[in-house]
Amino acid sequence: MIVITFAGHGSPDGRLLLFDSDATDLPGTALPMAALADAFKGTRARTVLCVLDCCFSGPMAFG
């Protein structure tokens, strides 16, 4: 089982803004939620729970 929680900011284009994200370069410095979803798909874990407490987190539900 994998449990991940994230409380922070998200961007309208579906990225998680991390502590070192640069607002002038989100594509190069923020984590796309699609990449996170792909990482979950690649795990051998039987269960993955991801709790997002951030704005614009809706795209992850269907990522």
Image (cartoon, rainbow, N blue to C red):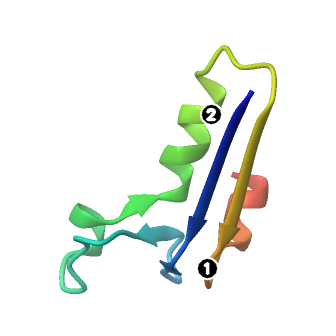
Mark 2 secondary-structure assignment: helix
Q: What separation in Å lies between label 1 and label 2 (alpha carbons)?
A: 19 Å
At a point 63% along the width and 81% down the height, the residue shown is 56
Q: Quadrant of the N terminus?
A: top right
Give coordinates of residue 15: x percent, y percent.
47, 68
Residue located at (62% from left, 85% from top):
55
Q: Earlier in the sequence, mark 1 or mark 2?
A: 2
Under tag 1, what secondary structure? loop
Residue pointed to by mark 2: 40
Q: Which of the numbered marks, if any, corresponds to residue 26? A: none
Q: Residue at the spot x=80%, y=19% of the render?
A: 46
**Amino acid type, callout 2:** Phe
Which quadrant of the figure has residue 48?
A: top right
Give the x, y percent position of residue 39.
54, 33
Q: Is residue 15 left or right of residue 24?
A: right
- Residue 34 lies, with reference to residue 55, above or below; the image says above
